[in-house]
Image (cartoon, rainbow, N blue to C red):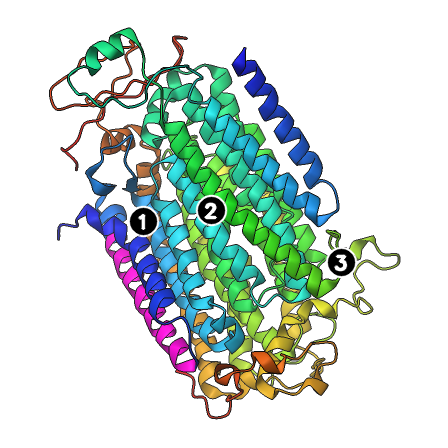
Amino acid sequence: MAVSANLLAVPVAAPLLAAAFILLFARWGGRRRIRQQIALTSLALCLNLAAAAILFQATAGRGERFVLQLGDWSAPFGITFYGDGLSATLLLLTAIVALAVYPFAVATIDYHRARMGFHPLYLFLLMGVNGAFLSGDLFNLYVFFEVLLMASFVLLTIGAQPAQTNSGIRYVVLNLLASTIFLVAAGVAYGTLGTLNMAQIAERLPVASPAVQTVFAGLLLVSFGSKAPSLPLFFWLPSSYHTPPPAVTALFGGLLTKVGIYTLFRSFTLFFPELLVSWQPVLLTISGATMLVGALGALAQPGIRRVLSFHIISHVGFMLMGLAVAQSGNRLAVGFGLGAAVIYLCHHMIIKTALIMAGGAVELHMGSDRLVSIGGLVTRQPLLAFLFFMSAISLAGVPPFSGFVSKLSLLQITLDTRHWVVSGVSLFASLLTMINMMRLWRESFWGEYNRPSRVPVRILQSRIRQRLMLTPVAVLVLLSLALGIWGGPAITLSMRVAQQALDRQAYIEAVSPSSRISTADADLHLISSGTYLLVSPVAKSGTAAHAPPISRGSVR
Amino acid sequence: MISILLAIAVGSLFASGTYLILRRGQIKLILGLALLSHGVNLLLFGSGRLTEGRPPIFLDKNEYAETIASNLPADPLPQALILTAIVISFGITAFVIVLVNRRHTVTQTDYVHGEYVPLLREGDPFDFSDSSDSVQYDWLAYEIDEVYDSEDLLPGIPAMPVSERDESTAMEEDSYQWP
């Protein structure tokens, strides 16, 4: 089946159109309107999942690449969407996570929040995340970042309880700072390289001066590392993720930090493959310290969601470790590290969402998630206890689940490339993860039944809502189990994805074929008929390149 | 010369923005964010190279070859980027102002606190039995408020004023069947 590149627009267009439709026609009114909103949102989520699955099958399965130049404006000037295996993998997982969290959100989001626009915001967040995965242009990446940040700001603070507004300020300010730094990086790229298109940046960066490379890479590392979040810049995450309703936390934990990880993967493999070698000590130090601090911080947290949000940080360290060894091969393959990081990313998105949802269900049953004051839920909610236990041991990396496969492959590449310290640190962090998960399990499910809230939450006495909350958790746990059992094919697939992501030349040729790009150091381009000319008046420093001619038509 | 002035302007905008963000007051925070976004906009402006008296767009297609040969055109792209960045920062500033206003209403504070860190207490750092951070779970109160519609169960949570109650906020949880 031939897949058209127009399919790349669906993951952005479907949520956008559905959200716009909701805001226009189903915004005001009572509960009937909210039911219509729920129906429309589910429709958009299913469309998104279908498009992402087709794209994944075509890119990761058959090795194709898709480029969509919106409105037939060719590469450096129009909006470019680029989809390869890495993008499609993340799109598919995003679609799965968004569709899985949605029933949980429908069951637990109260009427007031739904009336304030929870459902369209959910779609806008999904649209921003999908657009960031597909964008082939630095400035569009910034715009999609802002779209998803804006939606996440409102989702985080919707309801405006005191704790939510407190955490909202920290979250907003630190994320805006990261966006500002990213915009500075875009300005530096345009000023020195004369382009914002990612393929052209990749083409021109090797001839730029080392100072430009270092500044650009440093700015990108700081801004994406702050969104990821890695070690010195992670403080916005654990101080804000425990305040919104659990459905919002599950969505954020599954999707938001992965955008930072994806952009780190993309920019470092596309722009600075040689920096992956020369900056390897820095990246390995950051990753080791991130996983250690995340796991140690989780040990000191008093509540379920606080523990889980520190574990997000710890796992970001694991993925960064895979990125740091991406360029060094072992006896299996070059790029094994990136493949291992990709499969870790899949595992993390699936199981972290499941675990946060299960923790949120515990919190809703108990009225609190403080570990000292709750306990004994295993007799009242055996299914929930079972699912929580399964996802907890999957997160810790116990064999039949996906955590084992992903951690084993990461450990293998790190040991093969003889980074003994960081592999030891990762083992220690895994042990701490296990301790933390067992602590969560023991405190919330074992012991005397203890329910601190004196007010019964009637939301949980409805059987339909119980099912809506627990079914997605069960589905995600089964997915994790499948990823662990069919670990061999999954590794093969993720290796193919990693090879595709590491192939810079193919990216450059796919987005803007070199015949159309002129990097000659001349102020004047030959004028051919039917071609407008636009020469950027950059200085004749010899390092700066020039904007190429726009050619209309001949769009892939 | 003008580029040196621009560099100084960008640097001072960034410096004062950072300084204001590091203050505790919420209004200073907003001003700092605004100054930072202005600094970035000026930086983007400088990335297009500062030229004088050159047209960015040519209306006459037949003449533009010699126009270019004699006089390089100005680059219009940074202005477009700045326009987008201005719109985005405008929206975000509006949101932050609303958030700060709401926070002031809800918590009656003007300061941006750090987070409560249990490890900094005296005694056993792993003993959380006396930490009084139950206020952090007050989002649940909203839920309960909706289900029971009784204010006396929830001291401290303001009830919705009568003027805002309409039929769509009427509590009909019992008859409501979830999909």
Amino acid under label 3? Thr
Considering only vertical position in the picture, is A204 above or below A134? above
Q: Position of residue A437 (x, y in %)?
A: 61, 63
Mark 3 belongs to chain? B
What type is the residue that disc 1 sits on?
Ala
User: Which residue is the site of mark 1?
Assistant: A88
Q: Position of residue A56 (x, y in %)?
A: 28, 52
Q: Is residue A233 visible?
A: yes
Question: Disc number at residue A422?
Answer: none
Taking the magenta stretch, the answer to whether it contains residue A36 is yes
Q: Earlier in the sequence, mark 1 or mark 2?
A: 1
Few, some or many residues within 10 Å of mark 2 (<14, 14–19, 20+): many
On whether residue A141 falls in the magenta region, the answer is no
Point 43% across, 67% down: residue: A119
Q: Main secondary structure of the magenta part?
A: helix
Quarter of the view holding residue A474: bottom left
Q: Chain of mark 1?
A: A
Residue B109 disc label: 3
- Residue A424: percent from left, percent from top: 61, 42
As drawn, which residue projects farthest toward the right? B122
Disc nearest the viewer among 3 and 2: 3
Specify the label residue A146 is tagged with: 2
Q: Residue at x 77, y 55 (%)?
A: B117
> In the rendered structure, which amino acid carries the disc numbered 2?
Glu
Disc 3 to disc 2, C-alpha distance: 28 Å
Write down the region rendered in magenta: A31-56
Mark 1 or mark 3: which is in front? 3
Q: Quadrant of residue A543?
A: top left
Q: CA distance from mark 1 to mark 2?
A: 21 Å
